[in-house]
Image (cartoon, helix red, strand yellow):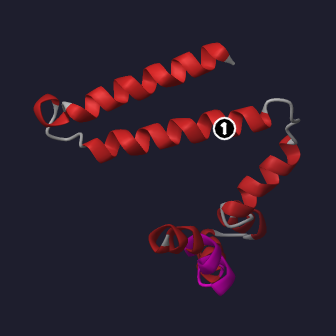
């Protein structure tokens, strides 16, 4: 705990000094960049401390990732169901035009832009 505090303080000082000299050190790094970096590192430390003694459910994680990627693999499903190449194209086209597929694919992007 004490070591973690010392490391965190050292990072704050290092990031602060980088921010103070950012104009001369780099034209691409602004003080706000180092501030956001520090916030991200602090959040990482906080979240890792919360998850330290928790157990990971791998199957649930796989399901959530699959759902986040718009569910089933439409190309694989079409390849299994089709008997020829033109039928594959038709099945994939039907799936892509499905409003549910479009919503699942577009939702993360729209949400990221809004927030």
CA neighbours of label 1 inside 10 A, class few (<14), some (14 to 19), many (20+): few
Left or right for 55, reference 5? right
Q: Position of residue 98 (x, y in %)?
A: 65, 84
SS at mark 1? helix
Q: Magenta segment, principal secondary structure?
A: helix
At 65% from the left edge and 64% from the top edge, which residue is drawn?
75
| Highlighted range, magenta | 95-106
Q: Position of residue 41 (x, y in %)?
A: 52, 35
Splitting the image into 4 quarters, where does residue 73 fall?
Answer: bottom right
Q: Position of residue 103 (x, y in %)?
A: 62, 79
Splitting the image into 4 quarters, where does residue 54 fall?
Answer: top right
Left or right for 113, reference 71? left
Q: Position of residue 65 (x, y in %)?
A: 72, 54
The foreground one among 77 and 106 is: 106
Indicate whether residue 91 is drawn in magenta.
Answer: no
Left or right for 24, reference 88? left
**Relative to 69, does residue 101 appear above or below in the rendering?**
below
């Amino acid at each position: 705990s004490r070591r973690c505090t010392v490391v965190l303080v050292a990072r704050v000082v290092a990031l602060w000094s980088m921010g103070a000299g950012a104009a001369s050190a780099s034209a691409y790094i602004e003080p706000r960049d180092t501030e956001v970096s520090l916030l991200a590192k602090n959040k990482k430390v906080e979240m890792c401390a919360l998850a330290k003694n928790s157990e990971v459910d791998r199957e649930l994680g796989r399901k959530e990732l699959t759902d986040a990627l718009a569910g089933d693999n439409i190309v694989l499903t079409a390849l299994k169901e089709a008997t020829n190449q033109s039928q594959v194209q038709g099945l994939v086209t039907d799936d892509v035009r499905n409003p549910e597929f479009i919503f699942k694919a577009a939702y993360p992007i729209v949400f990221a832009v809004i927030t």
